[in-house]
Amino acid sequence: NLKEKKKKPLPRAKSATEENGKSHHKDEVSASSTSVEPQIVLLDHGLYHDISDELRADFCELVRASVNRDAFSARKMSIKFCGESGGLYRFFPLVLSPWFVFSSDVTAADLQAARKGALPPNTKLEDIGKFLISLHDEGGTNMLGVLHSLGYTRGILNDLKFPEHLRLRAFAKFATLGLAERVNKSSAMVSSGVSSTVAISLLLAQVRVEVLKWIIAVLTPVAPILAIAGKGSPGLAAAMVSPAAHGLAALAVFIARLTEHPELMC
């Protein structure tokens, strides 16, 4: 009851958030007043993580490769972060988003899990723990801090039912901007904003996120058939539906630019 809450301090509120895909809780302090509407004030951890430009650019490259379904580049960058021992590198793209399932060998069960926003069914908690240890040993504590911050934000967005493809649009946007600065710092930005070349790259990144969404949506219903077809069939099927997915993605982006709020666009 809003009127009753105005008369007395609001209780402390808690909101479910995620840390690298796992739910946990963080306290949030509620602001109260007898003269204004109740508000929820989110307090962060007060932790800030510095990473080198090289590490930042490598992370941007990993995100771009995952969005593009470029398994070779995604594997290369994941190994750079986590090392090759034990094959733990394959978990890095999946921790960023279950939709990055095409960043390694994909199975029909993996597709179904990605559609639900979950990790592959054969993934064990022990595997994720080993991956985080490997990431710490190779990339240092700051990269773990980056993952923690991303997981915290992802948890809030999940609570708000924010669509995954919009979250990945933001991922792709800033990964593209980060790589543009590394390639040519002088021409990536102009006085009116980004250069025309970067603007085209941003648009393509947005389309590729939509392509990823459509491929997962189209292949998930036929996953049982792909499972019978055997190993490699999901990747082949993705290549077969890719042209149609690109057409649907381009149409979706065009409609989005006409209907969505500008802040949601690249």
Image: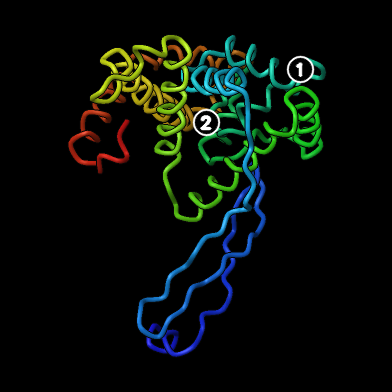
Q: Element type at marker 1? A: loop
User: Which percent across, then down, holds residue 47?
Assistant: 64, 46
The amino acid marked with disc number 1 is Gly
Q: What is the count of numbered marks? A: 2
Residue tagged 2: 99
The residue carrying pointer 2 sits among few (fewer than 14), some (14 to 19) or many (20 or more) residues within 10 Å by Cα, namely many
Q: Secondary structure at mark 2?
A: helix
Q: Estimate the spatial distance between the alpha carbons at disc 1 and disc 2, rounded to whole Å.
A: 22 Å
Label 1 neighbourhood size at 10 Å, few (<14), some (14-19), many (20+)?
some
Query: Is residue 235 depicted above or below 145 in this figure?
Result: above
Residue 238 position, x and y percent, is 47, 17
Q: Residue at x 37, y 12 (%)?
A: 186
Q: Position of residue 72 (x, y in %)?
A: 59, 9
Front residue of 74 and 179:
179
Q: Amino acid at mark 2?
A: Trp
Q: Which residue is pictured at 40% across the width and 32% down the height? A: 169
What residue is pinned by disc 1?
Answer: 83
In the rendered image, which quarter contains the N terminus? bottom left
Rendered image quadrant of residue 79: top right
Q: In this rendering, would 11 be left or right of 25?
A: left
User: Compared with residue 20, is residue 65 higher up or lower down, i.e. above or below?
Assistant: above
Rendered residue at 73%/22% (across/down): 82
Mark linked to residue 143: none
